């Protein structure tokens, strides 16, 4: 009956599975402990901007957190996308990439794929 649970119930179930405290979740997500406590006490759900940090901290997919259902039939991450912090090198790279027009994006992808291929061949030697 997992999919009949609320988002907050799934969060606390996962915390229990991981033997993680609300304080640890707070530290990993930057969400105040008082807000996390409110979810449990008042049976409310976190706001939308907190979903991705929670998923990252609990190593779950947004699909599972929001619905209890995961396309792969599991709660653990088995996804074909990444959750990336905007402040990292990868996040900055993606931000720049997203600001390019389509033609420039295709050009950058061509360079990246050619460079990766070249590096792979160099490593094979």
Image (cartoon, helix red, strand yellow):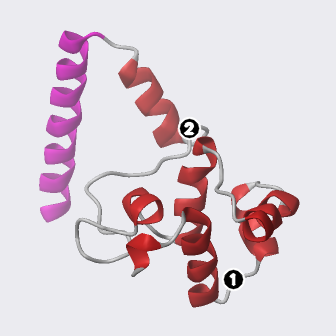
In the rendered view, tell whether residue 76 sits above or below residue 18: above
In the rendered view, tell whether residue 20 sits above or below residue 85: below
Residue at point 47%, 63% (across, down): 65
Which one is nearer the viewer's eye here, 14 or 98? 14
The picture places residue 7, in percent across and down from the top left corner, at 55, 63
Does residue 80 appear to the left or right of 125 in the view shown? right
Residue 118 inside the magenta-drawn segment: yes
Q: Which mark is residue 80?
A: none
Residue 14 inside the magenta-drawn segment: no
User: Which range of residues does the magenta coloring cover?
Assistant: 101-125
Residue matched to label 1: 20
Query: In terms of secondary structure, what is the magenta stretch mainly?
Result: helix
Residue at point 31%, 51% (across, down): 81
Front: mark 2 or 1:
1
In the rendered view, tell whether residue 24 sits above or below residue 81: below
For the N terminus, the image quarter is: bottom left
Badge 1 crowding class, 10 Å Cα cut-off, few under 14, some 14 to 19, many 20 or more, is few
Badge 2 crowding class, 10 Å Cα cut-off, few under 14, some 14 to 19, many 20 or more, is few
The picture places residue 15, in percent across and down from the top left corner, at 63, 80
Dot 1 falls on a residue whose secondary structure is loop
Give the image quarter of residue 100: top left
For the C terminus, the image quarter is: bottom left
The picture places residue 41, in percent across and down from the top left corner, at 80, 69
Disc 2 to disc 1, C-alpha distance:
25 Å
Residue at point 21%, 49% (across, down): 119
Give the image quarter of residue 28: bottom right
Residue matched to label 2: 86
Q: Is residue 78 visible?
A: yes
Does residue 111 appear to the left or right of 36 in the view shown? left
Do residues under tags 2 and 1 come within 8 Å of each other at their CB atoms?
no
């Amino acid at each position: 009956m997992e999919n009949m649970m609320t988002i907050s119930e799934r969060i606390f179930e996962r915390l229990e599975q991981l033997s993680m405290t609300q304080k640890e979740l707070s530290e990993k997500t930057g969400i105040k402990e008082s807000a996390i406590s409110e979810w449990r006490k008042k049976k409310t759900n976190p706001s939308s901007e907190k979903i991705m940090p929670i998923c990252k901290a609990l190593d779950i997919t947004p699909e599972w957190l929001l619905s209890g259902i995961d396309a792969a039939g599991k709660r653990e991450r088995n996804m074909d996308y990444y959750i990336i912090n905007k402040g990292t090198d990868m996040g900055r790279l993606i931000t720049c990439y997203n600001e390019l027009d389509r033609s420039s994006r295709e050009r950058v992808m061509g360079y990246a794929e050619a460079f990766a291929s070249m590096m792979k061949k160099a490593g094979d030697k």
